[in-house]
Image (cartoon, rainbow, N blue to C red):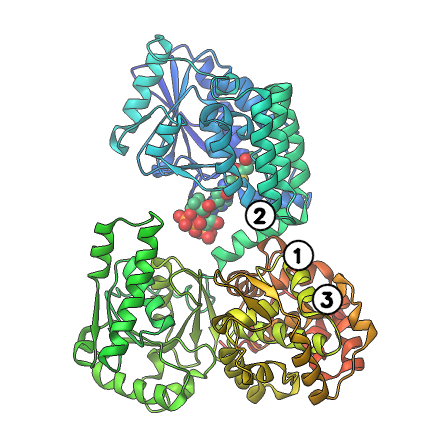
Amino acid sequence: MGSKNKRRTMIEVGADGVAVIAIINPPVNSLSLDVLESLKESYDEALRRDDVKAIVVAGANGKFSGGFDITAFGGIQEGKVQKPKPGYISVEVLTDTLEAARKPSVAAIDGLALGGGLEIAMACHARISTPTAQLGLPELQLGLIPGFGGTQRLPRLVGLTKSLEMMLTSKPVKGEEALGLGLVDAVVSSHELLNTARRWALDILARRKPWVASLYKTDKIESLGEAREILNFARAQARKRAPNLKHPLVCIDVIEEGIVAGPKAALWKEAEAFQGLLKSDTCKSLIHIFFAQRGTSKVPGITDRGLVPRRVKKVAILGGGLMGSGIATALILSNYTVILKEVNEKFLEAGIGRVKANLQSQVKKGKMTQEKFKKTISLLTGVLDYQSFRDVDMVIEAVIENVSLKQQIFADLEKYCPPHCILASNTSTIDLNLIGERTKSQDRITGAHFFSPAHVMPLLEIVRTKETSPQVIVDLLDVGKKIKKTPIVVGNCTGFAVNRMFFPYTQIGLFLVERGTDVYQIDRVITKFGMPMGPFRLADLVGFGVAIATGMQFIENFPERTYKSMLIPIMQEDKRAGEATRKGFYLYDNKRKASPDPELKKYIEKARSISGVAVDPKFVKLSEKDIVEMIFFPVVNEACRVFAEGIAVKAADLDIAAVMGMGFPPYRGGIMFWADSLGSKYIYSRLEEWSNMYGKFFKPCAFLAERAAKGAPLSAPVELGKSRL
Ligand SMILES: C[C@H](O)CC(=O)SCCNC(=O)CCNC(=O)[C@H](O)C(C)(C)COP(=O)(O)OP(=O)(O)OC[C@H]1O[C@@H](n2cnc3c(N)ncnc32)[C@H](O)[C@@H]1OP(=O)(O)O
């Protein structure tokens, strides 16, 4: 018999008197309000019926529940969807109906029990899980706190320290660990799950197993004094890790309330805090990022054609340098067979050595066993010629940025690789049409632009020329998913999406410094804004050689919007080339700790005199707000150009490019989302003002001008006709 609410839950009563209530809301059985309403109805029915002795809660299709329906948050935030009265779900449904029921219930957890999903499970009187199930409270990653009693029940089940770790990091635990922690009561295989849960529920009824209401457990909670120490330590850590974020502190306060005033009182505080956080900009931004990240692999005109990805088994990589070895590491870690080609024995040995070192660092951190290391490295073969390229499915070229060398390589690849083989380049700046000029294989030439270190950084820019076939893009999207990268599909141009946005980020720093703003002040303000490092620390990390080479590409291609400063070349001439030489904008000690260098002044003065610029007192005392805007509005301007040219199909893709490629703070929603929170009119007016005062470098692009004139958001779609894809 099903519930009335579109059968969002299903109730089935067996001959043993156990009612199994299944949550049904594909793909992850998320908890929309009607699912929760239906769950309550099913419970009411099970409690009413005389033939039901005990209850098991499960999720359909091998997934317990992925938590509250995140798609519903938007509607609630905008006031379009009526929100339930605070505490209705956590107190009335989970505590007063499920946990206080006079019939015992057991959660049968397979697949996922996340957020509200785990909170339902914790309100049951016992939990059985499979070994692979993931259990966690990841709400903080959405700018929220658990809102269905999780802040109270998790500490009481696993202890304060572990529960804080699980909530503050948003990381789930698997079945076996959950068992060790006391979060679940038994771990069994999926095919034994339901029967074990049924028996367990009957055993509780017969008092052969304990009937536990997690909310009132006390054995895992420390005394008030000890608890306060643990909570204060967590507060200090949270402030240090994310000084701009309030919700981790709110979460700790709500946990503390439970210890001070009791769990039932704290449920009300939790409900109130949850409603407050739901309205915050942080929450709106992080929810935007959640969907934007999932949206990058949905590419109009490509992934909607019904194409099935071909199986890529063997991949060849050309070049065993930093990039090539990182890409090889990422691939073998996901079980791809890889051949690494170099030009001589010495380079080959060094390349393989780098891959081994990447894996060894995982072994050292305890993330990989020695046995797994051996198995993984056995997937890699080094070669010096093209003989073994006859059966490769994909090649990724990762040699130095030299056009004629790349052209020769692609001409060779066309000769030696099978006709189905995907020919990808990891170039970060060079036009792919140029690279493929000496071949007739334009339809299978694509860009696979990884970010360094390639086995760690999560972003993959997939570059599509006008000729690249959609099948090749679909194949590459599939490889990207298998190696756990977030892909963004972009059009072909100098710098693609990420490096196009990075360029003004560094350039404007140089502009400000020549006019008197302090290098270290700029880095401090930008780090405070939420970037992992400011433009000067970043230039040191990347190295001045790379910074100059990339800069040259931009000067050649976009001369009208380049600020030409000699500061970096002058420093490089004096053998200061960044962190690798222990001297750049900062000085580096043995442990690579950066400290300011008073000597920097002399280089800045020299650069100033070459540019013919004098110190302007206004720039010496620039406010933090002005520094942030002067650094980031030119980045927004470039992002607008990238979007208007159709290099990126969706503004949300640029948000992901900024967050994952540049380190833009996700809690600000990405570059375009953040810009829209300030308004196109405001950004336009400031750029226009600076452009009049300081030159074309700041000139707002036509797209930005048009959107500002209409008062339209920058992230609204561009008419399809204009797209370059
Ligand atoms: C009151 C409560 O305390 C508040 C809450 O419960 S807040 C919600 C807490 N839950 C979460 O944060 C979990 C979020 N989801 C995830 O982390 C991951 O999606 C997952 C681990 C569940 C599955 O990951 P994976 O298998 O890689 O699939 P993924 O592509 O992410 O998701 C599959 C689909 O389910 C959707 N989805 C996942 N979780 C969802 C949720 N909680 N609500 C709505 N949709 C969800 C995704 O958007 C995606 O949709 P799409 O196919 O249309 O793009």
Mark 1 surroundings: few (<14), some (14-19) or many (≥20) residues within 10 A? some
Mark 3 surroundings: few (<14), some (14-19) or many (≥20) residues within 10 A? many
Please identify the quarter of the rendering in which residue 403 is found. Answer: bottom left
**Mark identifier at residue 627:** 3
| Residue labelled 2 has its Cβ within 8 Å of some atom of ligand 1 | no
Q: Is residue 5 visible?
A: no
Quick one: SS at disc 2?
helix
State the image coordinates of residue 50 (x, y, percent, origin top left). Answer: 41, 10
Task: Find the residue positioned furthest to the top.
Answer: 206
Q: Residue at x 24, y 51 (%)?
A: 370
Q: Amino acid at mark 3?
A: Ile
**Sooner in the amino-acid sequence: mark 3 or mark 2:** 2
Q: Quadrant of the N terminus?
A: top left
* Mark 3 → mark 1, Cα distance in angstroms: 11 Å
Residue tagged 2 = 241
Q: Amino acid at mark 2?
A: Arg
State the image coordinates of residue 142 (x, y, percent, origin top left). Answer: 56, 45
Near-viewer residue (373 or 136): 373
Q: Is residue 577 visible?
A: yes
Task: Find the residue positioned furthest to the right.
Answer: 617
Left or right of 228, for residue 491: left
**Sooner in the amino-acid sequence: mark 2 or mark 1:** 2
Q: Amino acid at mark 1?
A: Lys
Contact between labelled residues 2 and 3, with CB atoms less than 8 Å apart = no
**Mark identifier at residue 528:** 1
Near-viewer residue (347 or 118): 347
